[in-house]
Amino acid sequence: MNISKPILERSQFSTGYAFFIGLVLMFCSFDILAQTDANVKNSAKTNQQLSDIQQAINQQKQTLSSTNVEISDLEQQLKTDDIAIGEVARNLANTSSSLTTTRQKLGQLSAEKKQLTLAKKQQEQILAKQLRAAYSTGHHDYIKLILNQQKPSNVQRTITHYQYLNAARIKEIEAFKSTITQLNDVTAQYQQQAEQLTQLTQTQSQQKQLLELSKTKQKQTLKALNKKALTEQQKLTKLEREESALVALLKKMAATAQKVDNLIGLSKLKRKLSWPVKGQIRHRFGSSKQGYLKWKGVFLSAPIGQQVKTIHNGTILFSDWLKGYGLVSVVDHGDGYMSLYGHNQALLKAVGDRVEAGEPIALVGQSGGQANSGLYFEIRHTGIAVNPKLWCK
């Protein structure tokens, strides 16, 4: 019986099956290796992408940080420019006021000089007439006239007459001397005022030139600042910081403000106060400013250099530059009421000064980065902004 053939066949089957399994395993290995290699490549690619993104983020952060530094530097330069303009503009305003006073004084002195010259001429004529009359009647020889009198009564009458004429001449002579003295004094004062006028005119011309140079520099700084484009969110953040700084400042001032007599607040003055400047309201109280932020006051369009007048009597609490608001004056009116005047060209009053209703405290400008000239005006009560239209006519 031959059993080797089945055994051989089984052996051959086993060998073929093993070979098949080996091939399958080999192909699976190749596939696994291929997938592993692909995963490694994908992982490397992903890592590279993450690295590129992280590098881009870091670069963006550096750019943003650099931009913030540049903006901060430009804002500091803008502050310097605003303060320089404020100083020159205040000096120029003082010079203009002195020029007006000097011209008025010159006008008064000129009129006084004219009157004194006329009086001098009239007195000269009176004295000349008296002298001619005395000479023509022979009164120039006083002793001879007395000795020629035949009656004693005539002597006394002659003496009295001569004393009267002599007193009249002395009076006219003294008046003439006084007129000459006054005329000389007035002429000297007039000359002094004329020289002062010339100096003030030259100073005013120099100040105007300096003001124009300062304005040009301010415009260049503002132009460079505007080139630093900010997103809406960055603008909102910037305004939030500026408003928070203002509120903190006002709160601090309210805490340190001393109670002053005759400052009773504004509660009884609704619809009775005058606006600080004459101009159109460009931004109204409560209107949208940026994002959720609203205007806490009003912006009044007005020409540069126009006087800003306080709405009521009070005390100056703040007179300086404030980021976002430029040159600012804050007046304490008592009973928790304050008024704020921003974006001025120049500040005319110092901290602690007492001011009366309608008194000029500043000049309209566009400090603090404003593109257009005008006044930012607020009224606050116990730190809360209220609508100025409820108080101003």
Image: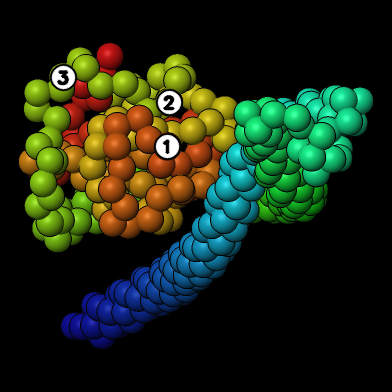
Image point 32% across, 57% down: which residue? 351
The image quarter containing residue 129 is top right
Question: Tag on residue 270?
Answer: 3
* Residues at marks 2 and 3, CA–CA distance in whole angstroms: 18 Å
* Upstream in sequence: badge 2 or badge 3: 3
At which x and y percent is residue 46?
A: 44, 66
In depth, the one of 178 and 299 nearer the eye is 178
* Upstream in sequence: badge 3 or badge 1: 3
Q: Say which residue label 1 marks.
A: 360
Q: How many marks?
A: 3
* Residues at marks 3 and 1, CA–CA distance in whole angstroms: 21 Å
* Residues at marks 1 and 2, CA–CA distance in whole angstroms: 10 Å
Q: Amino acid at mark 3?
A: Lys
Q: How is the image coloured?
A: rainbow
- Secondary structure beneath dot 2 equals loop
At which x and y percent is residue 223?
A: 65, 46
At which x and y percent is residue 225?
A: 59, 51
Q: Determine contact: label 1, label 2, CB under 8 Å.
A: no
Crowd around label 3: few <14 · some 14–19 · many ≥20 (10 Å): few
Image point 9% across, 27% down: which residue? 267
Extreme-front residue of the structure: 150
At which x and y percent is residue 166?
A: 70, 38
* Front of the two marks 1 and 2: 1
Q: Say which residue label 2 marks.
A: 277
* Upstream in sequence: badge 1 or badge 2: 2
Extreme-bottom residue of the structure: 4
- Residue 104 seen: no
